[in-house]
């Protein structure tokens, strides 16, 4: 069968923008709740039980993405600095993967 992500946690690149259309419109606990900001806005696709073909249109490639996350337990400079370094490391890792 097909999986949404590979063994390294990477979303299938060929299907990414189809998945984005479905996720941004249908996952009640994901995009809408995240207060995210995606530009351009993902394509709207509403799931219908009668849709047996599941033809999900691709969204346009993203040029801007902002997804907030909330942190706790940051009580001193070292913990804040370590957090920033960890986030930068993650960003560089996935930027290198495209």
Image: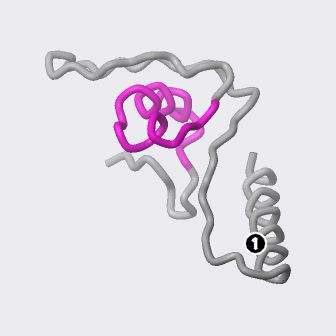
Residue at (80% x, 77% y) in the render:
82
Decide whether residue 29 is among the magenta residues.
yes
Quadrant location of the C terminus in the rendered image:
top right
Nearest the camera: 13 or 81? 81
Q: Name the outermost residue toward the left.
A: 50
Quick one: which residue is furthest to the front in this view?
A: 75
Q: Which residue is mark 1?
A: 83
Residue 15, horizontal then vertical, whole percent: 51, 33
27 left or right of 77?
Answer: left
Q: Is 29 left or right of 20, judged from the image as shown?
A: left
- Please tell me whether residue 10 belongs to the stretch shown in magenta: no
**Displayed quadrant of residue 39:** top right
Magenta-highlighted residues:
11-37
Q: Identify the residue at image location x=74%, y=30%.
A: 64
Q: Give residue 77's position: percent from left, percent from top.
A: 85, 79
Which x, y percent locates residue 85? 83, 71
Q: Secondary structure at mark 1?
A: helix
Residue 59 at what x, y percent from top left? Answer: 56, 20
User: Which residue does the image show at 82% across and 62% down from the upper left?
Assistant: 88
């Amino acid at each position: 069968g097909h999986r949404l992500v590979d063994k390294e946690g990477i979303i299938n690149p060929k299907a990414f923008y189809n998945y984005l259309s479905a996720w941004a419109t249908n996952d009640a606990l994901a995009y809408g709740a995240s207060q995210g900001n995606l530009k351009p806005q993902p394509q709207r696709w509403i799931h219908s039980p009668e849709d047996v073909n599941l033809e999900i249109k691709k969204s346009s490639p993203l040029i801007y993405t902002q997804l907030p996350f909330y942190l706790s337990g940051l009580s001193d400079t070292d913990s804040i600095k370590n957090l920033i370094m960890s986030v930068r490391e993650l960003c560089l890792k996935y930027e290198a993967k495209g």
